[in-house]
Image (tube, grey):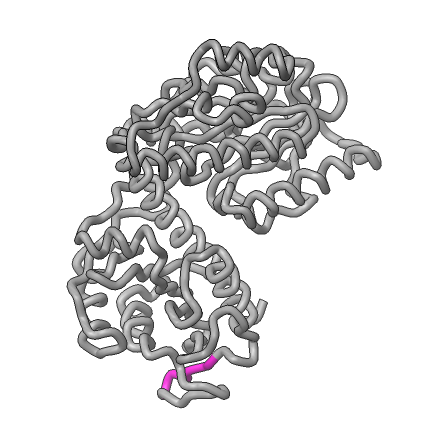
Amino acid sequence: MHPADQITLIIGRIYRSGLTTTSGGNISIKDESGNIWITPASVDKGSLTAKDIVCVKPDGDVVGPHRPSSEFPFHKAIYEIRPQATAVIHAHPPALVSFSIVHKIPDMNVIPQARRICGRIGFAPYGLPGSEELGRKIATEFESNPDYKAVIMENHGVVLWGKDMMDAYQRFETLEFSARTLINASILGGANILTDEQVNVHERALPVNHPHFMNPTYSSAERAIRTQIVQTVRRACDQGLMISSYGTVSVRWEGNDFLITPPGVPRWDIGLEDIVQVRDGMVEAGKIPSRSVAMHHDIYRRNPHINSIILTQSPHLMGFATSKRKFDVRTIPESWILLKDVPTVPYGLQYENSNTIAELMENTPCILLANDSVVVTGDALLQTFDRLEVAEFTAKSLIMGASLGELQPINEEEVEELRVAFNVK
């Protein structure tokens, strides 16, 4: 994809996700010839086209219908400091701006994949926006530690680089998500932070030695499931219920066989050919299933009423999953009818004893895995997705309510009345 098209795609995604404003933020790509393609100054981020993207030549000549972003100096400085960088993103996403205002750096051990994707985070002192001075301060901060791939800008926002645009975007999205999770957990009493060893448990859990089967068949029913999974993943991303670096969807196919998403593919870009068949405990040759595949297998095997599973990270549910505060859905009757009581299980249990989680799923369609994710199940995939939406909306309401006063759940008698009236088992 041409650099101008890549930039247009990603800035549009960032804008539609509410992670920048019409006038805020800028992104760039450095091509193999040393040209820097960058978003223009003073052009609506919500309606950019590839023709609006500006090219700055190595000799400083500008090609395009607009002026390059006023922040071009620090983009250029980062490329000089990090020769391996080919993409830079700067924006003002709300949670990271909050950290920049209080002069703090978000702890990347709050969720398991964040440390690997984001690395260590720097903090650059304040500089006048668009100035050469700001570029020097950001460059100095990156120079101070070769591990820095992202820098919080004091009272400003964030800037980060990637080996390509998708690498940069995943880092940007994951960093902002981690910041939002920490803020939500703070409202609920404070976040539990994983140790390095707990993070390493997750990193070691990627399945690589599953037995494979050859010559998979792709019936029309199987292909329909692939389409359904891909559409659901993209919808979850659009709705802010899944980020590009994390999320798994599976659907039962025949018996206890199922189809599941793979690891390592950005969730926004998952295609039909990426989906993995799992048959008789074996996986489709040449593919790797989600690291949670054993848990999905145990859930399907133990629960014939479950035909679809979504495992994901959404910001308000993860606020509860990373704090000691109970996610009490008894505060909203309709939520309890759909979700019942939602337990939180200790971090890492899905790798140590996934059968325990499968057993829990006999009695509830939704559980929180501490500091990891939410697991939601259902009959049809649409029902599972609806439950996920209801759970996230409920969590958001509870966090907003917690900022106002003490949450007031309904009592046991009222819950029993719901159980009878709506035949909740």
**Residue plotted at (42% across, 38% down):** 396
Give percent across and percent down for residue 360. Answer: 51, 12
Stretch in magenta: 54-59
In this picture, residue 379 sits left or right of residue 102: right
Q: Is residue 58 magenta?
A: yes
Q: Is residue 101 visible?
A: yes
Q: Is residue 22 magenta?
A: no
**Residue plotted at (60% across, 42% down):** 233
Give percent across and percent down for residue 176. Answer: 36, 50
Give percent across and percent down for residue 114. Answer: 36, 41
Quadrant holding the C terminus:
top right
Would you identify the image quadrant in which residue 349 lies? top left
**Residue plotted at (64% across, 19% down):** 281
**Residue plotted at (47% across, 29% down):** 374
188 above or below 346?
A: below
In this picture, residue 126 sits left or right of residue 11: left
Q: Is residue 294 visible?
A: no
